[in-house]
Image (cartoon, helix red, strand yellow):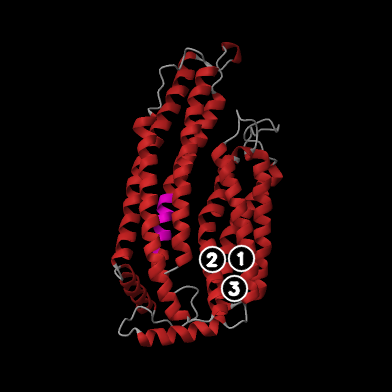
């Protein structure tokens, strides 16, 4: 039975990809974007890693560990370590966006298609933040150690500018393809759901909620893991004890954050199951957990915001995005909860049966249970 179900899903996936020229172009563009952007981002990562190693080697060779030498580069090394973690996040995001594109086509989620275009442009704008932070790293290093690192050159035109151009190019192409798919999938959904305005509204609410869960898988889960990585020094023997340290956070809260990180995955599973079964108690628990996650991220942001000199701008912006995602997820959890028992489940099941009959002999839409998406 499992093998038959897997074969059915594979056939459905293939049929959805080749359904039109726009679905094919959309998937191909997504794969190309991931491959090219990851390659360019790896180049930037290697550049940053080499710069950090050069600075550290110079410190070891010249024994620049004493502050009376007038050259303290340890804060710069911390900052470059943060920037390298940004590079890894960008690489992971490109893999995520490819998966996001595949699921959008597979489930014909129009809301997800449009959101993807917005996220791609946001990703392109984040590349500007990366450039700003790398430029600041070089300038701070030169100021901290006058005359010692003047020969270091980030070569922005060779590494960062091509990345920004490629991101903007693919964001524009994907926006055009998203509009084409929005029109195509919108008509398909209308045929399956029908003309009932109330049912359409509840169905769109459900689609938005599912899309938010997928985004939370990247933003919230990755953000929580990043928080654990950034403040991992708090469980070491030489953990910072003063709020002035750029990686200081109270140890009790750090362990609370670890618990929150584990709960994010549990919340995803509970949310999907509660939505599929229209389980009200489960959805109420999910809503409460979104509030807990939001508070957790706000506290981390409080300890992350420092002076312009010491703040990690990317992480702070990432945190605020996470807070916004938690708030939106909480709001749509309430919306979905209110729709339980309003007939959406029954209507969609009946509509899909009618839709399957009208689209025979396509076997890809056969389904024996109430699915979240089709």
Q: Residue at x 58, y 63 (%)?
A: 266
**Relative vertical location of residue 307 with respect to residue 126 in this rendering, above or below:** above
Name the spot of residue 102 as percent of width and height, x first: 38, 63
- Secondary structure of the residue carrying tag 1 is helix
Q: Mark 3 or mark 2, which has the lower sequence index?
A: 2
**Mark closest to the chain's N terminus, 1 or 3:** 3
Compared to residue 24, the image places residue 29 above or below, namely above
Q: Are marks 2 and 1 in contact (CB under 8 Å)?
A: yes
Q: In the rendering, which numbered label is found on residue 208?
A: 2
Task: State which region is magenta.
Answer: 93-102
**Residue 274, disc:** 3
Residue tagged 1: 332
Q: Where, by quadrant of the figure, is residue 328 drawn?
A: bottom right
Q: From mark 3 to mark 2, how far is it between C-alphas?
A: 16 Å
Most foreground residue, 112 or 230: 112
Calculate the distance from the C-alpha at mark 1 to the C-alpha at mark 3: 14 Å
Q: Nearer the viewer, residue 220 or 358?
A: 358
- Residue 159 location, x and y as percent? 36, 34
Of residues 182 and 253, the one nearer the viewer is 182
Q: Is residue 129 left or right of residue 295?
A: left
Name the secondary structure under disc 2: helix
For the question of whether residue 136 can be seen, the reply is yes
């Amino acid at each position: 039975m499992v093998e038959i179900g897997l074969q059915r899903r594979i056939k459905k996936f293939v049929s959805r990809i080749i359904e039109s020229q726009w679905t094919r172009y959309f998937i191909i563009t997504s794969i190309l974007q991931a491959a090219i952007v990851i390659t360019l981002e790896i180049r930037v990562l290697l550049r940053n890693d080499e710069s950090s190693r050069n600075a550290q080697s110079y410190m070891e060779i010249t024994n620049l560990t004493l502050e009376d030498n007038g050259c303290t580069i340890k804060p710069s090394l911390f900052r470059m370590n943060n920037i390298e973690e940004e590079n890894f996040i960008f690489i992971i995001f490109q893999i995520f966006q490819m998966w996001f594109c595949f699921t959008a086509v597979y489930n014909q989620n129009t809301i997800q298609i449009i959101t993807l275009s917005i996220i791609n442009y946001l990703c392109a704008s984040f590349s500007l933040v990366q450039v700003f932070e790398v430029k600041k790293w070089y300038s701070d290093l030169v100021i901290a150690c006058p005359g010692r690192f003047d020969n270091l050159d980030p070569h922005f035109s060779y590494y960062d500018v091509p990345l920004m151009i490629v991101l903007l190019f693919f964001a524009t192409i994907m926006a055009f393809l998203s509009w084409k798919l929005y029109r195509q999938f919108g008509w398909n959904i209308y045929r399956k759901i029908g003309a009932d305005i109330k049912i359409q509204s509840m169905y769109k609410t459900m689609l938005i909620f599912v899309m938010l869960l997928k985004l939370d898988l990247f933003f919230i889960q990755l953000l929580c893991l990043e928080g654990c990585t950034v403040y991992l020094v708090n469980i070491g023997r030489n953990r910072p004890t003063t709020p002035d340290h750029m990686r200081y956070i109270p140890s009790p809260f750090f362990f609370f954050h670890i618990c929150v990180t584990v709960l994010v995955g549990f919340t995803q599973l509970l949310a999907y199951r509660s939505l599929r079964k229209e389980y009200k108690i489960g959805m109420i628990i999910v809503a409460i957990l979104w509030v807990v996650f939001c508070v957790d991220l706000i506290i981390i942001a409080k300890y992350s915001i420092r002076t312009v000199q010491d703040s990690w701008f990317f992480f702070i912006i990432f945190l605020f995005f996470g807070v916004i995602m938690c708030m939106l997820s909480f709001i749509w959890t309430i919306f979905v909860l209110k729709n339980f028992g309003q007939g959406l489940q029954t209507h969609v099941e009946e509509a899909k049966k009618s839709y399957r009959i009208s689209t025979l002999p396509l076997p890809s839409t056969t389904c024996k249970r109430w699915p979240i998406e089709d």
